[in-house]
């Protein structure tokens, strides 16, 4: 089975010590989840990491795939430029994805050498843990509804399973930004309601997609999340392949829901 691992991970810049500084220590549980996942990717010798990010150059109606052969991480907007390391893009797999999906979905191919922070933070932290992999970055269609994101993920599954490479997929996703008075979006009681409901559904991965796609749209909008589309696409990718899920950490210290979740895949090289 070429799909070896699937995760949900947050992309808070505070997870990087040079950015988080004194705040970094408050996210210890999430940092440990990253270390655990990086060790797993390294142990399994993952060839390619597909990152689904909500923060790249997106299109309202088209899915975007970054096919750059080489990419770098630059977090200067957060006051940190890490030592330059070339990330190799898996342009061959990206090309197969393009050929298989371009007649079924609206696709835009881009070749951006500096990756968006929703991709850069997970890639940086997992690389720091010692994992080695090529990457593909996929950006959901901004205005397409959740059912379209899910269908796109299901089509991606077919291509991934046909590959001979060892592949892992990460949904780079922060949950509600309205959990506390100090939250970036201000406080709303619906923020915690959304997060609790989403985590409850994800704990039952077989039925999660259907339940999530039926969450009230007003609740979604009031939660001010930035991870639902990547999550639902990931659920499409693992449709029929996941036996259970495990929450590694969930933190709300800075008023944003940071969820780290591991999906156990049937017949994968999961130890």
Image: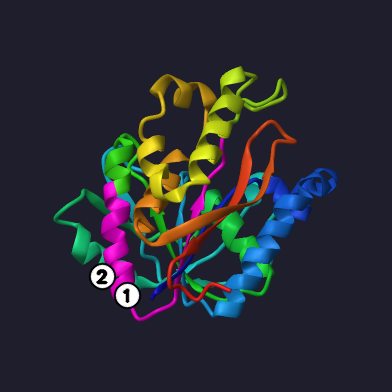
Q: Is residue 218 visible?
A: yes
Q: Percent x, y for residue 151?
A: 27, 49
Mark identifier at residue 96 = 2
Answer few, some or many: residues within 10 Å of disc 1's Cα (few below 14, many 20 plus, some between 14 and 19).
few
Name the residue that disc number 1 marks.
Answer: 92
Disc number placed over residue 184 in the picture, else none: none
Among the 4 quarters of the image, the one containing residue 177: top right
Quadrant of the rendering where the N terminus is positioned: bottom left
81 falls in the magenta region = no
The answer to whether residue 79 is visible is no
Q: How many marks?
A: 2
Write down the quadrant of residue 209 in the picture: top left
Which residue is pictured at 45% across the width and 49% down the height?
205
Q: Split into 4 quadrants, where in the image is the C terminus?
A: bottom right
Q: Residue at x 32, y 76 (%)?
A: 163
Q: Residue at x 50, y 76 (%)?
A: 269
> Can you say whether 194 is above or below 30 in the image?
above
Left-right relation of 39 to 237: right
Does the magenta portion include 166?
yes
Q: Which residues are magenta?
A: 151-175
Q: How is the image coloured?
A: rainbow
Q: Residue at x 45, y 39 (%)?
A: 228
Taking depth in this image into account, of 36 and 105 the one nearest to the observer is: 36
Name the residue nearer the viewer: 172 or 246.
246
Residue 115, position in %: x, y? 50, 56
Q: Does the residue at mark 2 contact the one at mark 1 (Cβ under 8 Å)? A: yes
- Residue 82: image x %, image y %? 68, 62
Q: Residue 76's x, y, as percent?
A: 64, 50
């Amino acid at each position: 089975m070429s799909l070896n691992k699937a995760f949900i991970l947050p992309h808070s810049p505070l997870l990087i010590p040079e950015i988080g500084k004194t705040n970094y220590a408050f996210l210890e549980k999430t940092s440990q989840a990253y270390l655990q996942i990086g060790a797993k990717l390294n142990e399994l010798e993952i060839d390619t990491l597909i990152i689904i990010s909500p923060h790249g150059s997106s299109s309202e109606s088209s899915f975007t795939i970054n096919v750059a052969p080489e990419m770098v991480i630059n977090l200067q907007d957060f006051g940190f430029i890490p030592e330059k390391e070339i990330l190799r893009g898996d342009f061959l797999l990206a090309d197969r994805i393009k050929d298989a999906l371009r007649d079924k979905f609206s696709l835009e191919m881009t070749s951006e050498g500096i990756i968006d922070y929703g991709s850069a933070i997970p890639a940086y932290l997992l690389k720091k843990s010692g994992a080695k992999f090529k990457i593909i970055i996929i950006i959901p269609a901004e205005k397409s509804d959740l059912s379209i994101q899910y269908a796109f993920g299901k089509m991606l599954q077919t291509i991934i399973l046909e590959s001979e490479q060892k592949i892992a997929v990460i949904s780079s996703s922060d949950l509600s930004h309205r959990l506390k008075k100090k939250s970036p979006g201000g406080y709303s009681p619906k923020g915690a309601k959304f997060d609790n409901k989403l985590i409850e559904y994800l704990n039952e991965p077989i039925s999660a997609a259907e339940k999530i796609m039926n969450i009230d749209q007003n609740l979604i909008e009031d939660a001010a999340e930035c991870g639902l589309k990547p999550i639902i696409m990931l659920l499409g990718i693992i449709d029929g392949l996941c036996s259970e899920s495990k929450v590694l950490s969930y933190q709300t210290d800075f008023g944003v829901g940071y969820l780290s979740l591991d999906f156990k895949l049937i017949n994968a090289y999961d130890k």
